Every structure is written in structure tokens, then in C-alpha cells.
Amino acid sequence: MVECTRLESEHTARYREFESPPLRIADRPRFLGLDLAWSERNPSGAALLDEAGYLVDVRADLRDDAAILGWVRAGLGSCGVIGIDMPTIVRNPAGMRPCERELGAVFRRAHAAPHPANLRRFPDGGRARRLIDGLRPAGVVEALDVCARDGRNVALEIFPHPAHIRLFGLSAIFRYKKKQRPWPGVLAEWSRYRAALATLAAADPPLLLDDTIPHAVSARGYKRWDDTLDAITCAYVAAFIWRWGIGPPHVRIFGDLDDGYIVVPDRVWEAREPGTQAT
């Protein structure tokens, strides 16, 4: 497989709700994260990272499949990973997928077990399945044999909650979902989530947040900031998978391509020595 060329990154991230997606830069690796809404009626979060860890684009206004496909196609590099927070393979008529049962057995105590996906909920296989199929003409594949610095563009199912547990060594998830929780507690957990992501500036691979992602947000319009951090998590996990490849000791697969899978980072991030570069 062809290793992607390492080039100087651009760091022009801005939180954009209504601008056009970035132009495709074909000679660089790119890592995309999608926090997909289950329905086109609701907006989805999207984040795009370059190899140096800078946010090239982050947004939470993409609604229909055509808009999401257009954004992804424009953001693809010559190689990389697309991390999708939504089931990509659903074949069970009812109940849970085997991968959800397996992941739940490991992460349930941390409240990081997934909701069940089945054909009752996703009669056509689900939105993520449609999007991946729509990206195949652009050269995107869905595969679990990803090696370090893989030369392909690979789409994978990601689940932020267990990723947080493993990356940050947590005993329980960040409780940033608004639901019926009092706002001060939700905000505190969102800020804690944002602060945890900021610590990845010293990780390998790095994630470099800037002031386009505020340290505190308001209750009004909160959903977009919830989606934004989840999309950034998906993009970072995508970069982590590309950096290290899928397999022990870095990344664990729950399930398979036959009945569905979820890919999870499997170790706490490691800081690099000051002044050194990722290898």
C-alpha cells in the first residue's frame, strides 16, 4: 500500500454553518468524522482533520444525504479514514447486533454500551450504509484490515463513548447529553469533554483545538456543540486508526464485516517527548 506523503498542514479551521465545504487536496491524508443524525430532518456534525492534527473544517448544519456526501467527497485526501458514529452494517431482524452485545459486556459498567441496531430500526440497512455505498465511486472502502498509514480511504463505524473510556482512562462516560439533566451539570460535563480533547495536543497522533471551539457554551443551540465534539472525536479516532492500524495493542474490533462491527481505540494516549515528531 502506498504511504501518504507528509506535507505541511493548513490550520484554517472555523466553525462554519453555511459555507461551502473545503476543496479537496488530493495529495494529503485526511481524517473525517461524522456524528450522523438518524434522520435527515436533523443536522449532523462533521469534522475534518489534517495529519498534523489541525481542524480544517468543523460544522453541524449538514442535513440531507446529498449535503453530507458532498462534504465528504470535497474533504477526502489521497488516503485516510472516515469515522462514522452510526451503525454501518445491520443485518439482524431484531434485538442487538453481536458486536453491540460484545462491546456492552466490556463497557456497560462505564455506561458506554450502545443502543441496539436492527432492521426494525433501519429497514434499509441505515443511513450510514447509504452514505458508504454512495462514496464507493470516490474510492472509499469499508475494511477492517487497516494498516498504519494505510494508502486507502476507509470508512469505519466509530462509537465515541467507549473511545473516551479507553483514550482518557475514564471509569465512566462524559455525561454531556442534555436529555432531562440540569443545565449547569450538562455544561460542566461538556467543558470537561472539551478539556479532555485538548489534552490530545500532546498525543500521537495529536489533536489541536483552537478558539473556534469555545470552552463554554450556552443552553440555546446546545445540540450543535454536542454534535461538534462528537464529530471531532470521530475524526480523531479516524486519525488514531490510520496512525497505528487496526489490531493489538492499539485498536480493538468488536464484531466483523458480516454482522456488524465497532472499532475502538484500545489504550490510553501516550504523550510524545517535547520537541519530537510523530514517526
Image: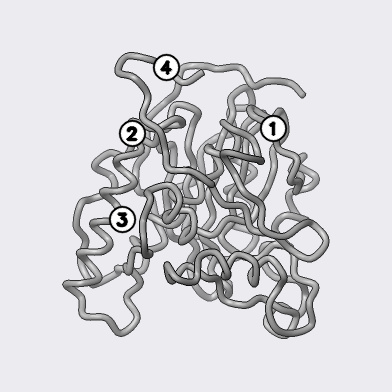
* Sequence-first tag of 1 and 4: 1
Q: Identify the residue at image location x=27%, y=61%.
A: 190
* Sequence-first tag of 3 and 2: 3
Q: Quadrant of residue 185?
A: bottom left
Secondary structure of residue under mark 4: loop
* Sequence-first tag of 2 and 4: 2
Q: Which mark is residue 193?
A: 3
Q: Amino acid at mark 2?
A: Ala
The answer to whether residue 54 of the structure is visible from this angle is: no
Give coordinates of residue 13: x percent, y percent.
37, 38
Secondary structure of residue under mark 3: helix
* Sequence-first tag of 3 and 4: 3
The number of discs equals 4
Give coordinates of residue 172: x percent, y percent.
37, 64
Q: Nearer the viewer, residue 97 or 137?
A: 97
> Local crowd at mark 3 within 10 Å, few (<14), some, or many (≥20)?
many
Residue position marked by numbered label 2 in the rendering: 201
